[in-house]
Amino acid sequence: MTRIGSRTTGRPTLAEVARLSGVSPITASRALRGISTVAPALVEKVITAAASLGYVANPAARALASARSHSVVVLIPSLSNQLFIDTLEAIHEVLRPRGMEVLIGNYHYDAAEEEDLIRNYMAYQPCGMLLTGFDRSDAARQMLQASGVPCVHMMELGDSEKAISVGFSQIEAGRAAARHLLESGRKRLAFVAAQLDPRVMQRAEGFRQVLAEAGKSAPELELLAPQLSSIGLGGELFSDLLAKAPDVDGIFFCNDDLAHGALLQALRQGVDVPGRVAMVGFNDLPASAHMVPPLTSIRTPRAAVGRGAAQALLALLDGKQVAVSRQDLGFELVVRESSC
Protein backbone atom coordinates (compact mmCIF):
# COMPACT_ATOMS: atom_id res chain seq x y z
CA MET A 1 0.00 0.00 0.00
CA THR A 2 1.29 3.44 -0.90
CA ARG A 3 0.90 5.84 1.98
CA ILE A 4 0.53 9.54 1.22
CA GLY A 5 1.08 10.93 4.74
CA SER A 6 1.34 14.57 5.70
CA ARG A 7 2.33 16.83 2.85
CA THR A 8 4.87 18.65 4.99
CA THR A 9 6.41 15.86 7.05
CA GLY A 10 5.65 12.60 5.26
CA ARG A 11 4.42 11.19 8.57
CA PRO A 12 1.21 9.13 8.77
CA THR A 13 -1.87 11.20 9.53
CA LEU A 14 -4.98 10.75 11.64
CA ALA A 15 -7.01 10.70 8.42
CA GLU A 16 -5.05 7.66 7.23
CA VAL A 17 -5.64 5.90 10.55
CA ALA A 18 -9.37 6.63 10.28
CA ARG A 19 -9.53 5.42 6.68
CA LEU A 20 -7.65 2.19 7.44
CA SER A 21 -9.81 1.40 10.48
CA GLY A 22 -13.07 2.38 8.77
CA VAL A 23 -14.11 5.11 11.17
CA SER A 24 -14.36 8.90 11.07
CA PRO A 25 -11.33 11.02 12.05
CA ILE A 26 -13.23 12.23 15.13
CA THR A 27 -13.86 8.65 16.29
CA ALA A 28 -10.23 7.74 15.60
CA SER A 29 -9.05 10.70 17.66
CA ARG A 30 -11.32 9.81 20.56
CA ALA A 31 -10.26 6.17 20.46
CA LEU A 32 -6.56 7.06 20.56
CA ARG A 33 -7.14 9.44 23.48
CA GLY A 34 -8.83 6.69 25.47
CA ILE A 35 -12.23 8.36 25.73
CA SER A 36 -14.61 5.75 27.15
CA THR A 37 -17.57 6.57 24.86
CA VAL A 38 -15.92 4.77 21.92
CA ALA A 39 -16.89 1.10 21.60
CA PRO A 40 -14.06 -1.29 22.58
CA ALA A 41 -14.19 -3.03 19.20
CA LEU A 42 -13.64 0.27 17.38
CA VAL A 43 -10.85 1.23 19.78
CA GLU A 44 -9.07 -2.01 18.95
CA LYS A 45 -9.43 -1.36 15.21
CA VAL A 46 -8.07 2.17 15.52
CA ILE A 47 -5.14 1.14 17.70
CA THR A 48 -4.25 -1.67 15.29
CA ALA A 49 -4.40 0.72 12.32
CA ALA A 50 -2.28 3.31 14.12
CA ALA A 51 0.32 0.71 15.04
CA SER A 52 0.53 -0.64 11.48
CA LEU A 53 1.07 2.87 10.11
CA GLY A 54 3.44 3.96 12.88
CA TYR A 55 1.14 6.87 13.65
CA VAL A 56 2.06 9.22 16.53
CA ALA A 57 -0.35 11.98 17.55
CA ASN A 58 0.78 15.59 17.21
CA PRO A 59 -0.56 17.47 20.25
CA ALA A 60 0.41 20.87 18.86
CA ALA A 61 -1.52 20.24 15.63
CA ARG A 62 -4.52 19.00 17.62
CA ALA A 63 -4.47 22.16 19.72
CA LEU A 64 -4.36 24.37 16.62
CA ALA A 65 -7.21 22.48 14.99
CA SER A 66 -9.49 22.64 17.99
CA ALA A 67 -8.31 25.94 19.52
CA ARG A 68 -7.93 23.93 22.71
CA SER A 69 -5.55 21.11 23.53
CA HIS A 70 -6.30 18.08 25.68
CA SER A 71 -3.11 18.58 27.70
CA VAL A 72 -3.08 19.26 31.42
CA VAL A 73 0.16 20.58 32.89
CA VAL A 74 1.04 19.39 36.40
CA LEU A 75 3.86 21.27 38.11
CA ILE A 76 5.48 19.68 41.16
CA PRO A 77 8.68 20.53 43.06
CA SER A 78 10.11 16.99 43.24
CA LEU A 79 9.88 13.62 41.53
CA SER A 80 11.95 11.91 44.22
CA ASN A 81 9.41 12.62 46.97
CA GLN A 82 6.84 9.83 47.51
CA LEU A 83 4.30 12.50 48.40
CA PHE A 84 4.16 13.76 44.82
CA ILE A 85 4.38 10.31 43.22
CA ASP A 86 1.17 9.29 45.00
CA THR A 87 -0.47 12.56 43.95
CA LEU A 88 0.54 12.12 40.30
CA GLU A 89 -0.81 8.55 40.21
CA ALA A 90 -4.20 9.80 41.43
CA ILE A 91 -4.22 12.63 38.89
CA HIS A 92 -3.62 10.16 36.07
CA GLU A 93 -6.45 7.92 37.30
CA VAL A 94 -8.90 10.82 36.97
CA LEU A 95 -7.68 12.49 33.78
CA ARG A 96 -6.79 9.51 31.57
CA PRO A 97 -10.39 8.21 31.18
CA ARG A 98 -11.30 11.67 29.86
CA GLY A 99 -8.62 11.46 27.17
CA MET A 100 -6.40 14.06 28.81
CA GLU A 101 -2.66 14.10 28.27
CA VAL A 102 -0.73 14.84 31.45
CA LEU A 103 2.44 16.91 31.05
CA ILE A 104 4.60 16.82 34.19
CA GLY A 105 7.02 19.58 35.08
CA ASN A 106 9.52 19.17 37.94
CA TYR A 107 10.93 22.51 39.10
CA HIS A 108 13.17 21.24 41.95
CA TYR A 109 11.84 23.77 44.50
CA ASP A 110 13.20 26.57 42.29
CA ALA A 111 10.82 29.47 41.50
CA ALA A 112 12.85 30.53 38.45
CA GLU A 113 12.72 26.99 37.05
CA GLU A 114 8.97 26.85 37.63
CA GLU A 115 8.59 30.17 35.78
CA ASP A 116 10.50 28.75 32.79
CA LEU A 117 8.33 25.63 32.78
CA ILE A 118 5.14 27.71 32.77
CA ARG A 119 6.46 29.80 29.88
CA ASN A 120 7.47 26.72 27.86
CA TYR A 121 4.30 24.73 28.51
CA MET A 122 2.09 27.63 27.48
CA ALA A 123 3.28 26.95 23.92
CA TYR A 124 1.31 23.67 24.08
CA GLN A 125 -1.88 25.63 24.80
CA PRO A 126 -2.81 23.46 27.80
CA CYS A 127 -6.48 23.28 28.67
CA GLY A 128 -5.68 23.38 32.39
CA MET A 129 -2.93 23.43 34.99
CA LEU A 130 -2.47 21.81 38.39
CA LEU A 131 -0.03 23.80 40.52
CA THR A 132 1.67 22.98 43.81
CA GLY A 133 0.92 25.66 46.37
CA PHE A 134 0.72 29.42 45.86
CA ASP A 135 4.31 30.61 46.20
CA ARG A 136 5.78 31.56 42.80
CA SER A 137 7.40 34.47 41.02
CA ASP A 138 5.45 37.59 40.02
CA ALA A 139 6.23 36.86 36.35
CA ALA A 140 4.78 33.35 36.71
CA ARG A 141 1.60 34.75 38.28
CA GLN A 142 1.22 37.28 35.48
CA MET A 143 1.62 34.58 32.81
CA LEU A 144 -1.00 32.38 34.45
CA GLN A 145 -3.45 35.25 34.82
CA ALA A 146 -2.93 36.50 31.26
CA SER A 147 -3.31 33.02 29.76
CA GLY A 148 -6.82 32.47 31.09
CA VAL A 149 -5.96 28.78 31.57
CA PRO A 150 -8.01 27.23 34.42
CA CYS A 151 -5.78 26.45 37.40
CA VAL A 152 -6.22 24.38 40.54
CA HIS A 153 -3.75 24.64 43.44
CA MET A 154 -2.70 21.54 45.40
CA MET A 155 -1.37 20.84 48.91
CA GLU A 156 -2.32 24.23 50.36
CA LEU A 157 -5.52 26.14 50.99
CA GLY A 158 -5.88 29.54 49.37
CA ASP A 159 -7.01 32.70 51.13
CA SER A 160 -9.09 33.91 48.20
CA GLU A 161 -12.40 32.40 47.10
CA LYS A 162 -11.33 33.03 43.50
CA ALA A 163 -8.46 30.55 43.72
CA ILE A 164 -9.46 26.87 43.58
CA SER A 165 -7.39 24.84 46.04
CA VAL A 166 -7.38 21.27 47.28
CA GLY A 167 -5.24 20.37 50.26
CA PHE A 168 -5.02 20.86 54.00
CA SER A 169 -3.70 23.36 56.52
CA GLN A 170 0.05 22.99 56.82
CA ILE A 171 -0.02 25.32 59.83
CA GLU A 172 -2.56 23.10 61.63
CA ALA A 173 -0.37 20.07 60.92
CA GLY A 174 2.53 21.77 62.68
CA ARG A 175 0.27 22.68 65.58
CA ALA A 176 -0.92 19.06 65.88
CA ALA A 177 2.67 17.78 66.13
CA ALA A 178 3.56 20.26 68.86
CA ARG A 179 0.40 19.56 70.86
CA HIS A 180 1.02 15.81 70.72
CA LEU A 181 4.58 16.12 72.01
CA LEU A 182 3.52 18.46 74.83
CA GLU A 183 0.63 16.20 75.80
CA SER A 184 3.03 13.25 75.97
CA GLY A 185 4.97 15.11 78.66
CA ARG A 186 7.84 16.51 76.59
CA LYS A 187 9.20 19.89 77.63
CA ARG A 188 12.14 20.79 75.35
CA LEU A 189 10.84 20.55 71.79
CA ALA A 190 12.86 20.93 68.59
CA PHE A 191 11.87 21.45 64.96
CA VAL A 192 14.18 19.91 62.35
CA ALA A 193 13.63 20.74 58.68
CA ALA A 194 15.26 20.61 55.25
CA GLN A 195 14.64 22.09 51.77
CA LEU A 196 12.62 24.87 53.48
CA ASP A 197 9.88 25.23 50.88
CA PRO A 198 6.84 27.35 51.81
CA ARG A 199 4.87 24.37 53.12
CA VAL A 200 7.72 23.33 55.43
CA MET A 201 7.85 26.86 56.84
CA GLN A 202 4.08 26.88 57.34
CA ARG A 203 4.44 23.72 59.44
CA ALA A 204 7.23 25.44 61.37
CA GLU A 205 4.93 28.40 62.03
CA GLY A 206 2.19 26.16 63.44
CA PHE A 207 4.73 24.38 65.65
CA ARG A 208 6.03 27.72 66.97
CA GLN A 209 2.53 28.98 67.70
CA VAL A 210 1.72 26.11 70.05
CA LEU A 211 5.06 26.38 71.85
CA ALA A 212 4.51 30.11 72.34
CA GLU A 213 1.01 29.51 73.69
CA ALA A 214 2.45 27.00 76.17
CA GLY A 215 5.29 29.33 77.20
CA LYS A 216 7.90 26.94 75.79
CA SER A 217 9.27 28.84 72.79
CA ALA A 218 12.80 27.71 71.96
CA PRO A 219 14.15 29.27 68.74
CA GLU A 220 17.58 27.83 69.51
CA LEU A 221 16.10 24.32 69.03
CA GLU A 222 15.24 24.90 65.37
CA LEU A 223 17.57 23.27 62.83
CA LEU A 224 16.73 24.57 59.36
CA ALA A 225 18.89 23.11 56.58
CA PRO A 226 18.50 24.33 52.97
CA GLN A 227 19.60 20.98 51.49
CA LEU A 228 17.13 18.51 50.02
CA SER A 229 15.52 16.27 52.60
CA SER A 230 17.06 12.79 52.89
CA ILE A 231 17.65 9.92 55.31
CA GLY A 232 21.37 10.71 55.48
CA LEU A 233 20.73 14.35 56.29
CA GLY A 234 18.26 13.33 58.99
CA GLY A 235 20.96 11.35 60.78
CA GLU A 236 23.40 14.25 60.57
CA LEU A 237 20.90 16.80 61.86
CA PHE A 238 19.90 14.52 64.74
CA SER A 239 23.52 14.19 65.87
CA ASP A 240 24.04 17.94 65.55
CA LEU A 241 20.93 18.65 67.58
CA LEU A 242 21.85 16.35 70.48
CA ALA A 243 25.38 17.77 70.56
CA LYS A 244 23.96 21.29 70.71
CA ALA A 245 21.04 20.60 73.07
CA PRO A 246 21.46 17.30 74.97
CA ASP A 247 18.36 18.08 77.04
CA VAL A 248 15.99 18.06 74.04
CA ASP A 249 13.27 15.45 74.63
CA GLY A 250 10.91 15.86 71.65
CA ILE A 251 11.53 16.47 67.94
CA PHE A 252 9.19 17.23 65.03
CA PHE A 253 10.79 16.46 61.67
CA CYS A 254 9.37 18.26 58.64
CA ASN A 255 9.49 15.04 56.58
CA ASP A 256 9.51 11.33 57.37
CA ASP A 257 12.79 10.69 55.58
CA LEU A 258 14.60 13.00 58.02
CA ALA A 259 12.93 11.17 60.91
CA HIS A 260 13.95 7.80 59.45
CA GLY A 261 17.56 8.93 59.36
CA ALA A 262 17.30 10.18 62.94
CA LEU A 263 15.91 6.86 64.16
CA LEU A 264 18.75 4.98 62.48
CA GLN A 265 21.30 7.36 63.99
CA ALA A 266 19.69 6.97 67.42
CA LEU A 267 20.23 3.20 67.13
CA ARG A 268 23.90 3.76 66.26
CA GLN A 269 24.43 6.14 69.17
CA GLY A 270 22.43 4.10 71.67
CA VAL A 271 19.88 6.88 72.18
CA ASP A 272 16.61 5.53 73.61
CA VAL A 273 13.58 6.47 71.52
CA PRO A 274 11.14 7.41 72.98
CA GLY A 275 12.68 7.12 76.46
CA ARG A 276 15.18 9.92 76.05
CA VAL A 277 13.70 11.68 73.06
CA ALA A 278 10.35 11.35 71.26
CA MET A 279 10.08 11.77 67.49
CA VAL A 280 7.26 12.80 65.14
CA GLY A 281 7.50 12.83 61.34
CA PHE A 282 5.37 14.14 58.52
CA ASN A 283 3.64 12.43 55.54
CA ASP A 284 3.49 8.91 57.07
CA LEU A 285 5.46 7.23 54.31
CA PRO A 286 5.01 3.43 54.00
CA ALA A 287 8.30 2.66 55.77
CA SER A 288 7.38 4.67 58.85
CA ALA A 289 5.24 1.90 60.36
CA HIS A 290 8.21 -0.50 60.07
CA MET A 291 10.96 1.61 61.61
CA VAL A 292 12.54 0.71 64.97
CA PRO A 293 10.62 1.92 66.84
CA PRO A 294 7.65 2.59 64.52
CA LEU A 295 7.45 6.29 63.75
CA THR A 296 4.62 8.56 64.84
CA SER A 297 3.76 10.69 61.82
CA ILE A 298 1.17 13.03 60.35
CA ARG A 299 -0.56 11.20 57.53
CA THR A 300 -1.32 13.47 54.59
CA PRO A 301 -4.07 12.81 52.00
CA ARG A 302 -1.67 12.98 49.04
CA ALA A 303 -3.66 10.68 46.72
CA ALA A 304 -6.96 12.33 47.69
CA VAL A 305 -5.43 15.73 46.93
CA GLY A 306 -4.51 14.55 43.42
CA ARG A 307 -7.97 13.12 42.78
CA GLY A 308 -9.74 16.15 44.16
CA ALA A 309 -7.62 18.62 42.21
CA ALA A 310 -8.08 16.72 38.95
CA GLN A 311 -11.84 16.46 39.49
CA ALA A 312 -12.08 20.17 40.26
CA LEU A 313 -10.16 20.97 37.07
CA LEU A 314 -12.47 18.75 34.99
CA ALA A 315 -15.46 20.59 36.46
CA LEU A 316 -13.95 23.91 35.39
CA LEU A 317 -13.25 22.55 31.89
CA ASP A 318 -16.86 21.35 31.65
CA GLY A 319 -18.07 24.86 32.45
CA LYS A 320 -19.37 23.89 35.88
CA GLN A 321 -19.00 25.83 39.08
CA VAL A 322 -16.77 24.17 41.68
CA ALA A 323 -18.96 23.74 44.75
CA VAL A 324 -16.16 24.39 47.28
CA SER A 325 -13.28 26.63 46.26
CA ARG A 326 -11.18 25.56 49.28
CA GLN A 327 -11.36 21.80 49.71
CA ASP A 328 -9.80 21.04 53.09
CA LEU A 329 -9.11 17.30 53.14
CA GLY A 330 -7.49 17.40 56.57
CA PHE A 331 -4.75 15.14 57.94
CA GLU A 332 -4.36 12.43 60.58
CA LEU A 333 -1.89 12.14 63.42
CA VAL A 334 -0.87 8.46 63.50
CA VAL A 335 0.58 7.75 66.95
CA ARG A 336 3.17 4.96 67.17
CA GLU A 337 5.93 3.93 69.57
CA SER A 338 8.43 6.69 68.71
CA SER A 339 6.45 9.22 70.76
CA CYS A 340 4.64 7.13 73.38
Image (tube, rainbow, N blue to C red):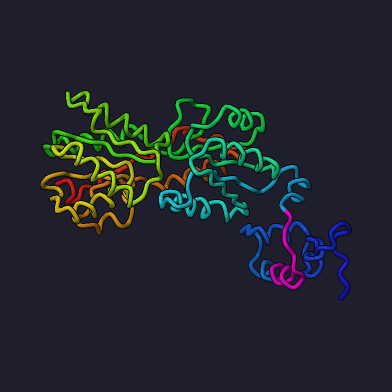
Residue 316 located within the stretch drawn in magenta: no
**Residues rendered magenta in the picture:** 45-58
Foreground of the two, 195 or 279: 195
Image coords of residue 98 (percent x, y): 60, 53
Q: Is residue 90 left or right of residue 299?
A: right
Residue 259 screen position, x and y as percent:
27, 48
Q: Is residue 138 above or below residue 65?
A: above
Q: Quadrant of residue 293?
A: bottom left
| 276 relative to 221 in the view: left or right | left
User: Would you say residue 56 sits in the magenta stretch?
Assistant: yes
Residue that lies at the very extreme toward the bottom in this rendered image:
1
Residue 116 location, quadrant: top right
Residue under the image location 59 percent in, 45 percent down: 73
143 lies above or below 70: above
* Rendering coords of residue 163 (x, y %): 52, 30
Residue at (47% x, 36% y) in the render: 133
The one of 286 and 165 positioned closer to us in this rendering: 286
